[in-house]
Image (cartoon, rainbow, N blue to C red):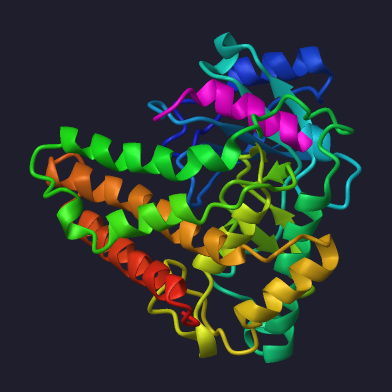
């Protein structure tokens, strides 16, 4: 029997997948209704049906920047740990550590029906500021639930290295920036205003203690899906950067990518329209503090650090573009975002609202 394959799915051998699923007791017969899902991740997402049940397969791309199989194993481990918790997430069905099946580790999860607000909103959400306010509050509620997970109790005690976590952060990303010097044509840090002083400020004002917890690692509006029938989160997605560290780094990341007062999106990298009704960042902070009981006295450090880290990540794409390894129009756009993020970090250091 020949199965029609959507374009770009050369990395998924459906016959091998079927044989593996047979061994796991996951249905029988052909894999049907195959569709490739798109999103911000480079990972392959494949939705299909078998024996009347829906599945979503997730595996790494052909040439991942890091160990793709290790990433899949870590994601699957987190989803398994979250089973039965109140953290909104996709349910894990099964995981395969054996890279010989599909060329890399992969896992199967329950399909999600929600939508990404940065892509577009259905009428229920787009037509109601009150609904969008509820969406924003649901986002910070979901993040709070992640922070409150007893990571040791769910089997994640060895999932990260919280000792010295904050001490490693600013230095690590400065090293990352310096590594871009390998790309010919990149003008260097001279194009990033105040990046040195911001890094120095982070080292001088780093919080001395924190409460270790589960971190998502890339928490922002594009990594949550909202329910179609209600203004609440269906699931937090893309756990590939999760670890055990300081959960307030996640809160800082959310704030760094959240529009400024009055919905000013000029300083953020994520655009959601319409925005009217979404809570201001100050309310997100208040709700997070109330739900988690976290000490937020050093919150400004986390906001500044998030801008700094994200800016240096984006500058890497510009450096690759300068060397001809990525499209220059994309590189220049991301460099502009990096400059704006550093400007936002500088204003936060000065005590301004945005």
Is residue 163 left or right of 311 when viewed as pictured?
right
Q: Is residue 144 visible?
A: yes
Looking at the picture, how far across and down is residue 306, in whole percent? 49, 57
25 up-or-down from 42: above or below: above
The part of the chain drawn in magenta is 65-79
Q: Total number of numbered labels?
A: 0
Is residue 236 left or right of 105 when viewed as pictured?
right
Q: Residue at x 55, y 21 (%)?
A: 69
Looking at the picture, how far across and down is residue 122, in whole percent? 64, 77
Is residue 345 left or right of 289 when viewed as pictured?
left
Q: Is residue 1 visible?
A: no
Q: Nearer the viewer, residue 50 or 184?
A: 184
Q: Residue at x 81, y 24 (%)?
A: 26
Q: Residue at x 73, y 55 (%)?
A: 235
Looking at the picture, how far across and down is residue 266, in whole percent? 38, 79
111 up-or-down from 341: above or below: above
Quarter assignment of residue 47: top right
Looking at the picture, how far across and down is residue 279, in whole percent? 66, 82
Q: Nearer the viewer, residue 344 or 113?
A: 344
201 up-or-down from 177: above or below: below
Residue 53: in magenta span: no
Q: Nearer the viewer, residue 80 or 348?
A: 348
Q: Quadrant of the N terminus?
A: top right
Quarter assignment of residue 250: bottom right
Quarter assignment of residue 10: top left
127 up-or-down from 285: above or below: below
Q: Mainly helix, strand or loop, the magenta region?
A: helix
Residue 69: in magenta span: yes
Q: Residue at x 69, y 65 (%)?
A: 296
């Amino acid at each position: 029997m020949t199965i029609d394959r959507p374009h770009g799915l050369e990395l998924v051998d459906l016959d091998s997948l079927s044989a593996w699923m047979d061994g796991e007791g996951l249905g029988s017969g052909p894999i049907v209704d195959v569709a490739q899902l798109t999103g911000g991740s480079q990972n392959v997402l494949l939705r299909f049906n078998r024996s009347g049940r829906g599945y979503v397969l997730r595996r790494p791309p052909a040439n991942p920047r890091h160990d793709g199989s290790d990433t899949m194993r870590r994601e699957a481990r987190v989803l398994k740990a979250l089973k039965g918790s109140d953290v909104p997430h996709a349910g894990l069905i099964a995981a395969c550590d054996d890279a010989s099946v599909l060329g890399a580790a992969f896992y199967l999860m329950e399909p999600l029906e929600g939508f990404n607000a940065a892509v577009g909103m259905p009428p229920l959400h787009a037509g109601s500021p009150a609904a969008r306010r509820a969406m924003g509050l649901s986002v910070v509620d979901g993040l709070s639930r992640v922070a409150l997970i007893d990571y040791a109790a769910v089997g994640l005690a060895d999932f990260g290295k919280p000792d010295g976590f904050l001490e490693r952060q600013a230095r690590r990303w400065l090293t990352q920036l310096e590594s871009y010097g390998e790309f010919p044509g990149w003008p260097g840090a001279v194009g990033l205003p105040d990046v040195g002083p911001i890094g120095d400020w982070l080292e001088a004002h780093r919080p001395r203690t924190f409460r270790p917890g589960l971190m998502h690692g890339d928490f922002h509006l594009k990594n949550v899906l909202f329910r179609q029938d209600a203004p609440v989160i269906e699931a937090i997605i893309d756990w590939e950067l999760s670890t055990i560290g300081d959960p307030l780094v996640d809160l800082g990341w959310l704030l760094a990518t959240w529009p400024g007062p009055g919905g000013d999106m000029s300083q953020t990298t994520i655009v959601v329209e319409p925005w009217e009704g979404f809570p201001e960042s100050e309310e997100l902070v208040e709700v997070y503090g109330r739900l988690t009981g976290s000490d937020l006295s050093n919150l400004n450090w986390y906001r500044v650090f998030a801008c700094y880290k994200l800016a240096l990540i984006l500058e890497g794409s510009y450096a690759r573009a300068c060397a001809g390894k990525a499209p220059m129009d994309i590189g220049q756009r991301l460099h502009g975002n990096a400059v704006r993020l550093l400007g936002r970090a500088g204003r936060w250091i000065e005590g301004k609202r945005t």
